[in-house]
Image: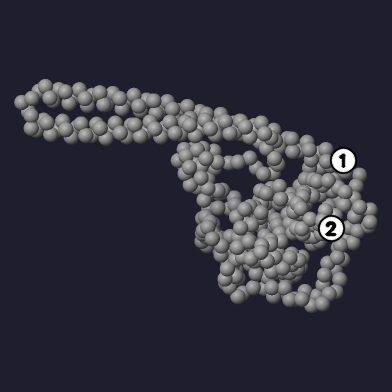
Amino acid sequence: MSQCPVCNSHYRPGDIAHCATCGWNLAALPATLGQIPQAFQSRDLEKLDWAQKTWTQLQTQSQQLSQLQQERSHLQAQLSQKAQKLTASPEILSQLRSQLKESAREKRQLQEQLATTVRLFRQQQQTLAAQLQKSKEQLAQSKNDKATQQTLSSQNFAISLSLNEQEAPAEVVVIHEFSTGIYGSRAADGTWQFHGLTGHYMNSTLELIPACVQQAIGNGYFSIAGGSEEKPALVGRVINSAKDGFWSVLAVVTERKHSNGEVFSAYRYFLSQGKDKLVQILNWMSRHKQKFGLHPTFNPSDPKKPGQQQRFESKSRFVLDFPSETQAWLDNVGTPLIIVEPIYTVEAIDRLATWLVERRRLMTQRPPQTEAWVYNADSVERIETFWWFNSLIGKNSRPSKDNFWGCEKV
């Protein structure tokens, strides 16, 4: 759970756009826009400080109003008692009535002040929302300008590589899985209707999902948007921890529609223990599509339980082949890298990501890092964890969701 920065109310990220308590806009600038300039950060901090102070003032006035209401009730009780016991004392009754009128007058003043403060707070919220939208548009334009410049600087280079499948000793790869937990029901036509997230995973073939994998998911390392049943978005990462060791994790992401009409990303994770298993998971997915006609995407109708993992026998390995001039160019290229010619397959992306991580490790003598890549995504939350490779068609094209891909920074 997260907290509203203004009133500290708890909320679940992604469920609501505005705080249910104070109405503060909880939407952040999208990560696809890159690093937010310092000027925008300072201005946003000033706006947040104003909102926090205003909210504190509202709370103080509300407390004062509540206190006056309690005092009024107390005075009314006293007046009633005195009226019963001192019917012959008009002076005391008059004094109590005067006190009650004064309390009512102070209450009206506080109510008017509170209404004015709330009105100003709402007006400032609308102004801030308009400024935020303008900032988003400015940052988006800046990002597009930068992408155009990078494309033009490398438009004369077309990466040349091929992926060769070679025979290898038979290897049995154990592939586990789990999915996003949802509340759903069957419609009359047999389709699923989704009513919300459960907050935990379902259809897991593991008794306990590795803690390092859960932490990576919680940190947003698999958070993307996009993907369909026919062409899902993919995130491949190798996760490592001292306790759990290496896990190769592939997230298959498809957009689904909530019963209220909102669109959300549904995840089906496939994982295998070891640091070089992503390409084998992809190989298994390819065989699955050949057999059933579709990728194995999020599917509540395909329940799983511990012990029902896949056992895939692999008798091949995939090797990249590219000329020495391509290797030399990749050794010296800066980031983000924009390649004019489209990459052939997601398997080639995985192999190139693995090659680049190992190559940079040898060149920098740093501890080994793990690869990560994205394919067919509309947007990515943790852009800063990737080297971006935008495969473009044409000299002046913009990056398209069909060929977003990358590998993790080292």
> For the point 77% across and 45% down, which residue is it?
399
10 Å neighbourhood of mark 2: few (<14), some, or many (≥20)? few
Based on the displayed image, in which of its 4 quarters is residue 65 positioned?
A: top left
Residue 150 in view: yes
Q: Position of residue 280 (x, y in %)?
A: 75, 68
Q: Position of residue 384 (x, y in %)?
A: 71, 47
> For the point 88% across and 60% down, which residue is it?
162
What amino acid is found at the position of numbered circle 1 in the picture? Ser
Residue 163: image tag: none
What amino acid is found at the position of numbered circle 2 in the picture? Leu
- Tell me the element at label 2: helix
Residue 256 in view: no
> For the point 53% across and 48% down, which residue is it?
2
Q: Position of residue 13 (x, y in %)?
A: 55, 48
**Residue that mark 2 sits on:** 362
Outermost residue to the left: 88
- Answer with left or right where residue 116 lies relative to residue 270: left
10 Å neighbourhood of mark 1: few (<14), some, or many (≥20)? few
- Answer with left or right where residue 244 lies relative to residue 85: right
Instruction: Compare marks 2 and 1 and give the one earlier in the sequence.
Output: 1
- Tell me the element at label 1: helix
Is 165 in front, or is 77?
77
- 3D distance between C-alphas at marks 2 and 1: 27 Å
**Residue that mark 1 sits on:** 153
Outermost residue to the bottom: 170
> For the point 69% across and 61% down, which residue is it?
239
